[in-house]
Image (tube, helix red, strand yellow):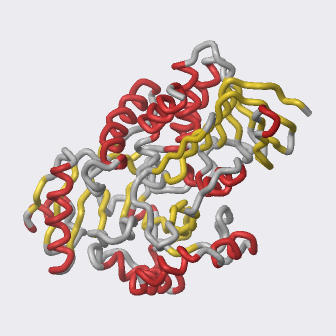
C-alpha cells in the first residue's frame, strides 16, 4: 500500500523525535511532515523509562554538545512546561562524597560545572545535615537548578503541538527497510510504503541498525545498558527533598545509583547500569538471540568490557544482589532499608560503542544525502531535546 509522499519524515516518537517533528513544522510551515513509531503510543522506551530529571550540564566535557545543549535545554524545558501548564519542580541536586577518593573527584566535578556555567554551591557538613538530615557524607555540593518533570507528558504535549501545526502521526508503524534505489527514497513499513524528500531518524535503541538499513557505513554499535530502579514506600516519600547523587566515576558515562523525588510525589532509587541481552525487553531475564549475537560478534563490545572490569563486576553484583544494591545507597543514606526497595520499572540506555571499545560520551549525529541520523542521544537527551531538535532542523534545512 502507498501511504503517500512527505517532505519530511521523522522516525521515532520519543521526546527527541517528537521535538524534531514539531520544530520542522514550525520552520517549514507549508511542508507535509510525518512522524512514525513502531509502538502504539509515544515515549515507550528511553523517554518513558528514566529518572525524570532535568539536568544542569555539570558533568559533561566543557565545549561538548552535551554541555552546550543541556544548559540550553534546561531553560527551554522549564519555559515549555510553564507555557503548557505542565508540572516542573526545581528541587536541586546534592552530589555527596563518602570517602577521600570521591572527595577529590567531587572537587574536580565542581570545577567542571563552573566551566560549564552551572551554578554550584559548596556545602559544609553542617549545611548538609541541616538541609538533608538523612544524608551522610564527608563532602557535598549543591546544584540548585536541577529539576524534575514527567518526560512522557512533555512528549505528548510536543506531539499535540505538532498535530495542531498540521503534522501527521502514525503509531504502530514498523520500519522494515529504506529504499533509495531508482532515484527515489521511501520507507518500507508493515503498513505500506512512505515516500520522503528528507528523513530524520531518532531511533534510540535501534539507531545503528537504521543507518545501516539506509545503506550507509557505520562502524559503531548500540550496546544497551539496563538500569534497574526501585521505589521507596509511601512512608518514606519525604526522606529527602533534593535529588541525592553519588560522585560518579569520571571514566564512565553513568551517574551511579541515586535517590530521586519524582513528579508524582514518590522517591525512586537507581539506576544501576548492566549490559542487557535484549535491546527493548525490560524483564530481568529478557533475552534476544539477535541482539546478543550482534553484540557478541562486535569486537568493540569485548574491548569495552576489558577496559572496565571492576566497574562491570560491581554492576553485576548490584543486579544479582539486592543487598549489595542497597549498600550503594546506604553509603550516603543509611536510613534506607532492604524492605524499602519496592519493585519499579527498568529502562535501557542506548550507548554507542566504538570498535576500539570506547564508550561515546557525547551526542552523535550523522547526515548523508537527504537523511539525518541521531546515533547517540542518551542522558541528558531528554533535558536537551528542544535544542537538539533545533540543531537537527538546521542540519536538515541546510542540506
Question: Is 63 left, or right, of 45 in this rendering?
Answer: left
Residue at 34% over, 40% down: 74
Numbered marks: total:
0
Question: Is 128 left, or right, of 329 in this rendering?
Answer: left
In the picture, the quarter occupied by the C terminus is top right
Q: Position of residue 9 (x, y in %)?
A: 67, 32
Q: Position of residue 333 (x, y in %)?
A: 29, 73
What residue occupies the far top of the structure in this picture?
30
Q: Position of residue 6 (x, y in %)?
A: 72, 25
Residue at 50% over, 26% down: 398
In the picture, the quarter occupied by the N terminus is top right
Does 31 appear above or below 378?
A: above
Question: Is 60 left, or right, of 277 in this rendering?
Answer: left
Dividing the picture into quadrants, the one containing residue 266 is bottom left
Dividing the picture into quadrants, the one containing residue 32 is top right
Residue at 50% over, 44% down: 151
What residue occupies the far right of the structure in this picture?
1
Dividing the picture into quadrants, the one containing residue 68 is top left
Camera sees residue 286: no
Does 250 appear above or below 321?
A: above
Residue at 49% over, 56% down: 50
Question: Is 254 left, or right, of 68 in this rendering?
Answer: right
Camera sees residue 153: yes
Does 207 appear above or below 395?
A: below
Q: Position of residue 243 (x, y in %)?
A: 31, 57
Q: Nearer the viewer, residue 298 or 163?
A: 298
Q: Nearer the viewer, residue 215 or 64?
A: 215
Amino acid at each position: 500500500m502507498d501511504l503517500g509522499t512527505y517532505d519530511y519524515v521523522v522516525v521515532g516518537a520519543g521526546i527527541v523525535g517528537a521535538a524534531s517533528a514539531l520544530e520542522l513544522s514550525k520552520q517549514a510551515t507549508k511542508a507535509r511532515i510525518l512522524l512514525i513509531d513502531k509502538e502504539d503510543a509515544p515515549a515507550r522506551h528511553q523517554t518513558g523509562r528514566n529518572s525524570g530529571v532535568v539536568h544542569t550540564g555539570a558533568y559533561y566535557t566543557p565545549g561538548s554538545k552535551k554541555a552546550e545543549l543541556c544548559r540550553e535545554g534546561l531553560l527551554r524545558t522549564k519555559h515549555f512546561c510553564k507555557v503548557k501548564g505542565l508540572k516542573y519542580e526545581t528541587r536541586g541536586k546534592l552530589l555527596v562524597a563518602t570517602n577521600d577518593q570521591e572527595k577529590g573527584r567531587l572537587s574536580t566535578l565542581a570545577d567542571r560545572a563552573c566551566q560549564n556555567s552551572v551554578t554550584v554551591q559548596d556545602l559544609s557538613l553542617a549545611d548538609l545535615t541541616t538541609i538533608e538530615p538523612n544524608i551522610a557524607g564527608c563532602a557535598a555540593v549543591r546544584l540548585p537548578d536541577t529539576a524534575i518533570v514527567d518526560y512522557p507528558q512533555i512528549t505528548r504535549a510536543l506531539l499535540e503541538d505538532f498535530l495542531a501545526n498540521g503534522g501527521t502521526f502514525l503509531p504502530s508503524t514498523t520500519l522494515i527497510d529504506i529504499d533509495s534505489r531508482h532515484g527515489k527514497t521511501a520507507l518500507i513499513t508493515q503498513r505500506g510504503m512512505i515516500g520522503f524528500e528528507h528523513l530524520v531518524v531518532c531511533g534510540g535503541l535501534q539507531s545503528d541498525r537504521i543507518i545501516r538499513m539506509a545503506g550507509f557505513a557505520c562502524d559503531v554499535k548500540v550496546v544497551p545498558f539496563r538500569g534497574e530502579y526501585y521505589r521507596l514506600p509511601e512512608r518514606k516519600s519525604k526522606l529527602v527533598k533534593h535529588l541525592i547523587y553519588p560522585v560518579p566515576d569520571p571514566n564512565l558515562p553513568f551517574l551511579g545509583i541515586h535517590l530521586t523525588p519524582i513528579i508524582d510525589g514518590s522517591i525512586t532509587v537507581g539506576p544501576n547500569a548492566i549490559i542487557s541481552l535484549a535491546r527493548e525487553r525490560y524483564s530481568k531475564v529478557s533475552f534476544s538471540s539477535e541482539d546478543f549475537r550482534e553484540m557478541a560478534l562486535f569486537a568493540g563490545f569485548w574491548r569495552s568490557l576489558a577496559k572496565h572490569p571492576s566497574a562491570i563486576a560491581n554492576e553485576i553484583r548490584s543486579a544479582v544482589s539486592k543487598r549489595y544494591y542497597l549498600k550503594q545507597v546506604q553509603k550516603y543514606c543509611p536510613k534506607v532499608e532492604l524492605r524499602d526497595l519496592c519493585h519499579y520499572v527498568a529502562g535501557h540506555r542506548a550507548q554507542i560503542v566504538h570498535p576500539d571499545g570506547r564508550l561515546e560520551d557525547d551526542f552523535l549525529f550523522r547526515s548523508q544525502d537527504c537523511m539525518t541520523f541521531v546515533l547517540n542521544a542518551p542522558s541528558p537527551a531528554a533535558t536537551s531535546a528542544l535544542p537538539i531538535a533545533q540543531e537537527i532542523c538546521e542540519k536538515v534545512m541546510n542540506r
